[in-house]
Amino acid sequence: MNFPYFNLLIALLPDLAVLAALFAALGVDYAILRYESPAKRNQTAARISVAGLSLGLFILILQLSWNLPPVSIGKDQVALTPLTLAVKAFLFGLSAIVVILSSSSQPPCKHVSEYYALLLLSTLSAGLLVGTENLLLLFVALETMSLSLYALTAFNKDSKASTETAFKYFTFGAVSSGFLLFGLSYFYGVVQTLSLPDAAVAISQLPSIPPLLRIAYLFIIVGVAFKIAMAPFHFWAPDVYQYAPTPIAGWIASGSKVAGFFVLLKILFPPALPASNQTIWAGAIACGAVITLFVGNLGALRQNNIKRLLAYSAIGQAGYLLTGILGGAIQGQTSVIFYILVYAVANLGAFGVINIVSDRNGLNGELPDVAGCWQRKPFLAVLLGVYFLSLAGIPPLAGFIGKFYLFFAAAAQHPAITHWNQGYYWLVGLALLFTAVALYYYLRVLKAAFVSDAPTDAKPIQVNPAEWVCLSVLALLLIAGGLFPEAIISFIQTTITA
Amino acid sequence: MLPLLTVIISFLGALVVGLIPDKHLRATRWIALITASAGLATAITATLQYVLPQGGFQSVLAQAWIPSIGIQFKTGVDGISLTLLLLTGLIAVCGVLFSWDIDHRTNTFFAFFLALIGGVYGVFLSLDLVLLFVFYEIAIVPKYFLIAIWGSTRREYAAMKLVLYSFTSSALVLFGLIALYFGSDLHTFDITQLMTPNTYSETFQIVVFPVVFLGFAVLAGMWPFHTWAPTGHVAAPTAASMLLAGVVMKLGAYGCLRIAIGLLPIGATHWAPVIAWIAVINILYGALIALVQNDFKFVIGYSSVSHMGFVLLGLATLNATGLNGAVLQMFSHGVIGALLFAIVGGSIYRRTHTRQLAEFDRLIDRMPAIAWIFIVAGLASMGLPGFTGFIAELNVLVGAWQAQNSLHVGVLIVAGLGIIATFAYTLVKIHEAFFRRSPAADNPEHPAPSHYPRLTCPEIIALTLLIATTLGVGLFPGRLITLINTGLAPILIALSTGHVLP
């Protein structure tokens, strides 16, 4: 059998660029810059990483504009559609911004290049994960990403909290991986194939749904629930968001969350699976959504650390996304993908601002840190406003359209009801009430930034040009995504239905 | 296209003002004033351009926005929206004039103010449910900052309370909108299309109507969800209270009329008796609470709640006279409410630096001009003939009598008691504020000046505009009533037949 190596090379060219950058960053640092100052080593490694990611991004855009037909290589191990290419490009872009945000802070410690190498490794695996339809590769990619994130969380070696958190994150993660792998093996036992499209065919040919498949789905959902911070598997999130290096927390909240939701979508909606199969898992997801909404939104109310607040908000937002998943294969999937992208942008922006305002001045991201931001850096306050209002779902920002679409999709699943507990109107109603709760804690941050005066001993906020560009791009994406969402939505929808 | 300019001008103005450096005070103020005046001028031109005999929605502009989920960018005006556009323009101009002395973060203030105005204009223009909702929510955030930054009296608490009430109620509205989309087979959010006959089944209307109506009515200050209104109005800076009482509460009433009643007429008929009872509780309760307030601004805040009761009562009558009265009362209270807040929160407070009635010592001697203007405004608020309030409340009550077969006669009795209570609190508070000697007045440490500074030029212009409007429309209401009636016609046909004509 003639394996299409050339096609594989073309398809994975962007990933190769990132991989090359990963080794280059390590190699240059070890071989050439060994005795230089950490600042210089930091700069070089960051530049190489950004260059690799930009090159990857550029190749992805070329691949997109060439209109490659959907490629599937080696039992769907690499399955590229315009959507997966675009999401990969998105992840590379986010990762480049994370690198830029990290590079201008103090070098995390003397292991400068490893930081960037691990970040690139997690980006690479997140990209692979988005672009595969094979269970084995899915799991391997997810694990590679998680392992790099565990190490990155612990990167602040002077901080005991950081180490403790990483250990917690790792233990939770390892257990959840166990669940996931267990579920996947049951799944394999039922469908007898690793490829998800083949699995969909196998499931649709089953005379009835075997209990084993239900158990498999339950275990898979539990395993993924950890990655997407769905309650009651969320306990790692507040600590990790608070104590991981802030840009890494931003990456965990954005990139890794996108990847986590893609795993869930891939397994819940294998291509061409009849809609009736949704009943296998709908109950579990609905329960999870309710608990997640409660835990996240109520937990966030009393937080005084912005990063911790964002962690609980991330849990709450996972609740909205789970609501959207119930909207089914087309509307549900489209809305979830749209919102997860929007959410990632807003979250990364928020962490970026905290990184500049708090971490650079040696603070821990408490609420008063942003006090008086309107006096100290007015434009930064505006950017912060855009991110948080988008998270809160205020129009005309993309967060509003995204949330609206999630709820719309969930309601569309069962539009005509005769009793309140049919369909998902009840869940939509609950989620909508929690958006009002959420506005309260988002406004607390904005109140500090826009209303309070700066403390007299506040240090000046320093922002370098690269950061201005990154943060402005993120804010512009949110504004443009809110004003002209049709292009993105119809793009996602057509690729899913194709 | 022309009416849409109001929105565009306001948002552009907000952007420009926001970008001006803080130190250019005069430029900021003048640009804000020019923006607000341009909005008013556009609203007037749009009204003049409206072809009355033709009726219906005119200047309609429809553009696909998010066709994947049936959302359009569709705007247009009818008689009701034009009335409220005019009101918004007027209050915006007067609000800017009454903010002339703001020197703390002036550019930000006017940016938020104009953004709020832009959102309000947008709501009145939208002909698509989601677009309307978008503008409705755009108006929420500026309110928070206007109150939290430039407010007084527990401003952060009041701002948060107001915003959470608005946002929670808007969550109800959004839920209702999604239900409205899936309740019909048309797969559109287009209001004009959803107004076609037999769009919604009877059960659907009866179940969904209270959700949508309640969502909007909270913003209209409906009892028992009115408590955001007095606290918010009192804490807000003068211009923001004028806008909140004058226009923002009308957003809620407008949504009740246009969406809840307009799209769900059977539901409205079913629930009208309940709404009528709540409305008269609003009237009486607001008036009685106003009677016992010691803070002058709280008096006005509760009077707003009371007056919005008339709007709700007018809506509950579901007949031509009553609905006309409701819209007229929106306009009337918009002008008079703004006038009262301008005098109490602006002119008087600026000079006395207190709003406690107990500390006011015969202000009629110390600030005669302001006192007389307030007395005129108070009479207007009481519903004296010659002012808009009289015609509006008369129409509402006549409408309520006509609706006798659906409304309980007790409703009318309570409404009558409410009117008496309105007389009582207006006269009592005028006495306490202007004609009573204060026991605290002889405090030698803080002697009250025998004459407070005179009215400033911006104040005179704004007050004149407002009084002239309430008096002018009160004496010659014909044209406004005709305008409103053209807007109400399709809704009335829907109500009489149970389904709606396009």
Image (tube, coloured by chain):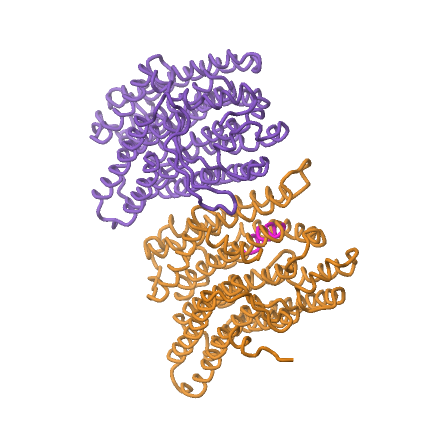
User: What percent of the width, then of the height, locates residue B131?
Assistant: 45, 40
**Quarter of the rendering occupied by the N terminus of chain B:** top left
Q: Is residue B165 left or right of residue B376?
A: right
Q: Is residue A160 visible?
A: no
Left or right of B208 in this view: B398: left
Write the residue at 26% across / 23% down. B370
Residue A344 higher or lower than A113, as above or below: above
| Chain identity for the colour purple used in the image | B
In the displayed structure, does residue B9 sit left or right of residue A143? left
What percent of the width, then of the height, locates residue B38? 27, 35
- The magenta segment: A314-326
Secondary structure predominantly adopted by residues drawn in magenta: helix
For the image shown, how many numbered marks are present on the structure? 0
Above or below — where is B406 with respect to B331? above
- A4 shown above or below A452: below
**x%, y% of residue A220?**
68, 62
Residue A488 horizontal side relative to residue B106, left or right: right
Say whether residue A316 is magenta.
yes
Quarter-wise, where is residue A430 in the image? Answer: top right
Percent position (x, y) of residue B297? 38, 29
Viewer-proximal residue among B203 and A42:
B203
Is residue A264 visible in the rendered image? The answer is: yes
User: In the rendered image, what is the letter of the chain coloured orange?
Assistant: A
